[in-house]
Image (cartoon, rainbow, N blue to C red):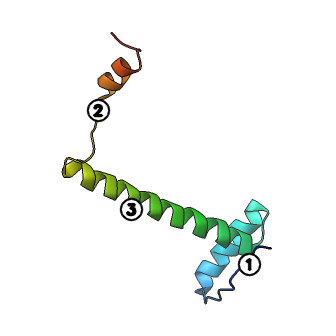
Amino acid sequence: MKREKMLAIELPEELSTRLTALAHKAGISEEEYVKEALLEHITDIEEAQIAEQILERIHQGQESTYSSKEVRRRLGLES
C-alpha cells in the first residue's frame, strides 16, 4: 500500500484562484494538479543539479565531450 504524507499550505487568494481555474481547465482536482506541478518542478530541479555535476566533472577533466561531427563519425553516419 502506498503511503502518502499530508501537507497543508496556505495560498494567497490570487494563486488559489489561478490554481482552481487551471485544475478545472485540465479536468482534474486541485490536489492532483498541485501534485503534478510539484513533481514536474522537483524533477526539473533534480535534472538541473545532475547537469551541474556533469558540467563540474567536465571542467575538472573527469568527463569527455564530443562534437556533433565526432558523434556522427563514431556512429558511422559520416566518414
Name which of mark 1 and mark 3 comes first in the sequence: 1
Crowd rating for badge 3 (residues with CA inside 10 Å; few <14, some 14–19, many 20+): few
Name which of mark 2 and mark 1 comes first in the sequence: 1
Crowd rating for badge 2 (residues with CA inside 10 Å; few <14, some 14–19, many 20+): few
Depth order, front residue of 79/22:
79
Q: Amino acid at mark 3?
A: Gln
At a point 19% along the width and 52% down the height, the residue shown is 60
Q: Nearer the viewer, mark 1 or mark 3?
A: 1
Q: Does residue 9 sit above or below 31 in this rendering?
A: below
Contact, mark 2 vs mark 3 (Cβ under 8 Å): no
Could you say which disc has been placed on residue 66 in the image? 2
Q: Secondary structure at mark 1?
A: loop
Depth order, front residue of 64/17:
64
Q: Secondary structure at mark 3?
A: helix
Q: Does residue 45 sit above or below 55 in this rendering?
A: below
At a point 78% along the width and 66% down the height, the residue shown is 28
Q: Secondary structure at mark 2?
A: loop
